[in-house]
Image: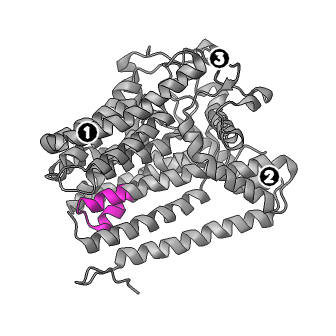
Amino acid sequence: MIAGTEKAAARRTFIWLFLTFYFAFLLTSSGRVRSTDEVVLDLEVESMASHGTTAIPQAVAQGLFYGKYDRFLRPQGPYGPGNAAVVVPWLWLGNLARAIAPGIPMGAKNLFVDVFTVGSSAAFSALAVAFSFLIYSQLGIARRTGLAAAMMLGLATPIFAYSSWFYSEPLAAVLLLGAACLLFGTSVPAQAVSARQAALAGLLLGLLLWVRATHVIAIPVFLAALILRNAKANWPSALTLAAVAGMFGAAYLIRNQYLFGNPLDFGYPQFGEGGKNMLGFDTPFLTGLSIFLFSPGKSILLFAPAVALAIPGVFLLAKRDRGLATIAAGVPIVFLLFFSRYSHVEGGYSFGPRYLVPAIAVVSLGLGPMLATGKRWVWKLAVVLFLAGFVIQGVGMATNFIEDMTTGAYYDANWAYRTDYSPITRMSKQLYFYLTSTSPAPLGRGFDRWFVFLAKAGVKRGTIAAILICEIAGLLFCGWQLRRSLLAPHDGAGKVVQAG
């Protein structure tokens, strides 16, 4: 267990790291919804904030409905209400800003609010980065080493790319890492995990079910991790975690029974575009596995090259905490096995291995122990993998990936995913086209950042500049405080002494 002074310093760094990445991710956010998944979730948030319901009649009126009608003939979206409920505060903030900010044309008001709503993904991704650092610190890894590993997760994996879009993966990642931190970050392996820790972790995993029900596959891994860490001491905590998460799961099934007359009906339509089955597991396992491992469009190692360094690090993690290592290895394995059979293994229109993004965040916990070895070749390889991952995320974020995918390159005429689709090469060409074009790109195309498309939509430059200044100032101030917390020495009285 780390000393009290170091624990205080780690918590301080955790806060400033989260805020630093939050402002950085806000600056790089796309700030808008484009895919069907993003649009429907956005409308669910709107309904949740306005009426306290997940029904989305506005989707029908706009010709954007994707989901199923419930027993009361109300259109319901297919996505778990947990995500929409958590994002509501960002929508409220957007509505407040829209009401007081000058220079927003009527046609751009919803676009303006979406900038704030999509900004929730920036918060979740930043919190995932901060939790990974906190876990490293609680393992006794030096703060600067933990920061380096956390930065690899935050800037060189799809956690960075998905911070700019409105998908549920960043929230799922932070819930998994938060539960792992609660269970395995605050006590030594020989001690029992307390009932309070188990209950709080169960709450996070229960919310994870309400974000996406298929994430239930992670809960047995957490239970196994508790037992493997210390079976005699942790079986009561395992029961507590199972009970709390189970209550959330039972509540979700009751909701489904009430809305659809079937506890296992989560509101997904049976078929998608072109009659494609949306609810099955008919992808041959080896086909799905090869897509996630080797395809140019969904390969884990291609889109998150740091995983190559994290995997051997999991074995080093096991020497520090078997329970945490079980999570770091088990969650990615069950996700890979499960989603390799999924009918729409590609995750709809999405960049990289969308469904495995939360698992990538978890397996990346092996980065900290690997860097902690201090071996020169490890750090040199880490730099190479970091740069590769950073460039790949940048290519995916620079322009609108939907623009390229809807050309017929992503799906064939029968709406089957093209396994040879290569977004990195195609989107690099797309970026080059817009950088060298002499004509300004129309709204929705070109450089895919919120301040660009708001300007194209007619929002006054002064309003955009004011938001940019606030975010840049926040980034600089929090980055300065993060540096101070990393440099802070501590005295013998248990107090952290701020440097400078």
Instruction: Name the side, left or right, on which 180 lies relative to 408.
Output: left
Extreme residue in the right direction = 106
Residue at 31% from the left image edge and 39% from the top image edge: 241
* Mark carried by residue 71: 3
Kind of element beneath mark 1: helix
Mark 2 to mark 3 CA distance (whole Å): 42 Å
Q: Earlier in the sequence, mark 1 or mark 2?
A: 1
Query: Which one is nearer the viewer's eye here, 77 or 203?
Result: 203
Kind of element beneath mark 2: helix
* Mark carried by residue 421: none
Magenta highlight range: 132-150
Q: Nearer the viewer, mark 1 or mark 2?
A: 1
Q: Is residue 84 visible?
A: yes
Mark 1 to mark 2 CA distance (whole Å): 53 Å
Labels 1 and 3 touching (C-beta < 8 A): no
Query: Which one is nearer the viewer's eye here, 68 or 306?
Result: 68
Q: In this picture, is 203 found above or below 213?
A: below
Position of the N terminus, as image quadrant, is bottom left
Q: In this picture, is 403 found above or below 173?
A: above
What residue does disc 2 label? 456
What residue does disc 1 label? 238
- Which amino acid, mark 3? Arg
Q: Is residue 387 visible?
A: no
Kind of element beneath mark 3: loop
Q: Earlier in the sequence, mark 1 or mark 3?
A: 3
Q: How is the image coloured?
A: one colour
- Residue 154 placed where, x, y %? 44, 54
- The prevailing secondary structure element of the residues shown in magenta is helix
Q: Earlier in the sequence, mark 2 or mark 3?
A: 3
- Residue 146 placed where, x, y %? 32, 62
Mark 1 to mark 3 CA distance (whole Å): 37 Å
